[in-house]
Amino acid sequence: MDHAHPRPTHPTHPSAQPDRPAHSDHGTRPDHATRPDHDAHHDHPQRAGHDATGHDTTGHDSADHAEILDLDAEVLDAPLATITAGLPLASAPRHIVDLGCGTGAGTLALLRRFPGAEVTAVDSSAAHLRRLREKAEAQGAADRVRLVRADLDARTWPGLGAPELVWASASLHHMADPADTLRRVHDLVVPGGLFAVVELDGFPRFLPGDAPAEAPGLEDRCHAALDRRHAGRVPHRGADWGPLLEAAGFTVEDRRTVAVALGPEDAGPAVGRYALASLRRVREGAAHALSVTDLTALDRLLDTDGPHSVLRRGDLAVRTERTVWAARRT
């Protein structure tokens, strides 16, 4: 059951229909694509974040980060399909670029939405690109994905072709100079092409408001602590990208918020692991600001062997929001 509720603030165009097939050769094409274990520029922990939970991260090659990206893709597959279906495209794109692709949630959703397209997937993490390649192979789509390892904060980008659609999900707010990135994307996308920006409101919430019993409202306090931390560390988190897109030369045709509300009966079997992985990241960022009572309660939720483990709860839900900007190069 899909509980994603888009709230459009501008009219949209009809969704695209599949066009012609495309192909790829896994990073051996001439416009400077690289294999996932070779860098196009520098091997920096990419600020072009692909963090499904919407917070600043380091060590993007870590297994736990890849896990949370994969769980986000699994649990929130239907809301993501809602977003891709609502893009204002008059015709199906043949070439798509996914900037800050992570382990491929957006890439694979776009391949499903546009079966005649190929996607150039760009990320700085070799581990994430390898994981994306594995998933594309498992879905029979490897010949439609080209992997490019690159630091999007570098002075120059590798050749990415001439896409009709550029997709950036949970990545722009991590850029060192977002205005410069937007100008580069404007020059990259073909005239008349679309740039889709998807940003998150932060970590999903999983617990009822009165949980856990010994510390009701724990998630609210954790989120407040993270917001204070991110205000200094990730200043563009939560930005209104509309004026910045206009300043870069785009025409913003649509802005909408997709509210995700998956109840315990809808969230699926992976919700416990998703909550566990997310709350572990919450603890990393918020522990310094939590009371002893709150920290103890959070640790009990994270203790997978204990009776209060989040994995044992039957009341987990998923509540979050995605905001989507669709901007046209005119």
Image (cartoon, rainbow, N blue to C red):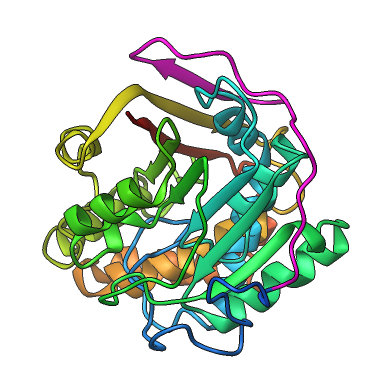
Whole-percent x, y for residue 281 in the image: 43, 69
Direction left: furthest residue:
232
**On the picture, is 171 further left or further right than 70?**
left
**Which quadrant is home to the C terminus?**
top left
State the extent of the magenta-drawn residues as a range.
1-26
- Judge by depth and name the residue closer to the eye, 315 or 239: 239
- Judge by depth and name the residue closer to the eye, 273 or 141: 141
Task: Look at the image and tell me whether residue 308 can be seen.
Answer: no
Q: Vertical placement of 24 versus 113: above or below?
A: below
* Residue at figure coordinates x 55%, y 72% from the top left: 148
In the rendered structure, does residue 18 fall within the stretch colored magenta?
yes
Direction top: furthest residue:
11
Whole-percent x, y for residue 76 in the image: 62, 43
* Residue at figure coordinates x 36%, y 30% from the top left: 328
Task: Look at the image and tell me whether residue 113 can be seen.
Answer: yes
Whole-percent x, y for residue 73 in the image: 64, 52
